[in-house]
Amino acid sequence: MGISFDATNQQFHLYNDRISYIMKVLRDGHLGQLYFGARLPEDRDYGHFVHTDYYRPTSAYVFDNEYGFSREHLRQEYPLYGTTDFREGAVEIAQPDGSHITDFCYVSHEIVAGKPKLQGLPATYVEEDEEADTLLVTLRDEKTGVELVLSYTIFRDFDAIARNARFVNRGNETVALTRAMSLAIDLPDADYDFVQFSGWWGRERQKNATHLR
């Protein structure tokens, strides 16, 4: 179990004996999702998982005269509406000037042992720090001054990643956080089931599965 960061390729790799979760800082400063699945070797560059090598018509592009890098077609860790991505975003911040567009870019990261507690919220936890490692990635929207901290915990004994998002307003104006998802995950195909455990008193943990299309 561990978390590695390749500074040359700006790549993060969370892994235990069975699974890997890989992402990287893209050229535009956004955090891109590369892979989530069976364990992969940790000492390799997986940048080829970012698909920017073919042209898509009627798309908007980030860089002049480069017809492959469109956020609309890239798998992202925390997608944002606008700035060439016209899908529904994971966050929306209403600003004093009426704008709802944000551009959260990578600032820094920290790797800590264990799993930090979520103050005032129910969450998974570990008994000892040796049971998990956590990656904290800080992104910042320069216009508003709001920082977004994405948390990823990889467990030693479970094939799961625990995630959460935290917003900190370091700007000079009051803004309204009108949408904030705990996580977002772009899936490369459609062969998945969404499983949830609904319930009520005396009938807890009722399994329900819905096929994703």
Image: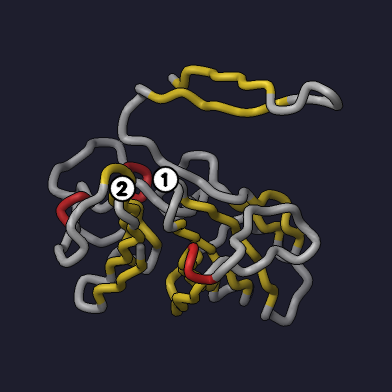
Residue situated furthest right in the rendering:
201
Q: Secondary structure at mark 1?
A: loop
Q: Nearer the viewer, residue 30 or 213?
A: 213
Q: Position of residue 149 (x, y in %)?
A: 56, 68
The residue tagged 2 is 18
Q: Amino acid at mark 1?
A: Asp
- The residue located at (20%, 47%) in the rendering is 51
Does residue 160 sit above or below 99 in this rendering?
above
Disc ID at residue 141? none
- Quadrant that contains the C terminus: top left
The answer to whether marks 1 and 2 mark residues whose Cβ atoms lie closer than 8 Å is yes
Does residue 127 sit above or below 71 in this rendering?
below
Q: Amino acid at mark 2?
A: Arg
Side (left or right) of 101 relative to 55: right
Q: Position of residue 183 (x, y in %)?
A: 55, 49
Q: Nearer the viewer, residue 70 or 46?
A: 46
Category of crowding for the residue at label 1, using alpha-carbon neighbours closer than 10 angstroms: few (below 14), some (14–19), many (at least 20): some
Q: Quadrant of residue 46?
A: bottom left
- The residue located at (53%, 18%) in the rendering is 210
Q: Quadrant of residue 6?
A: bottom left
Q: Nearer the viewer, residue 193 or 185?
A: 193
Q: Secondary structure at mark 2?
A: loop
The residue tagged 1 is 159
- Quadrant that contains the N terminus: bottom left
Q: Nearer the viewer, residue 112 or 193?
A: 112
Q: Position of residue 207 (x, y in %)?
A: 62, 21
Q: Position of residue 118 (x, y in %)?
A: 70, 63
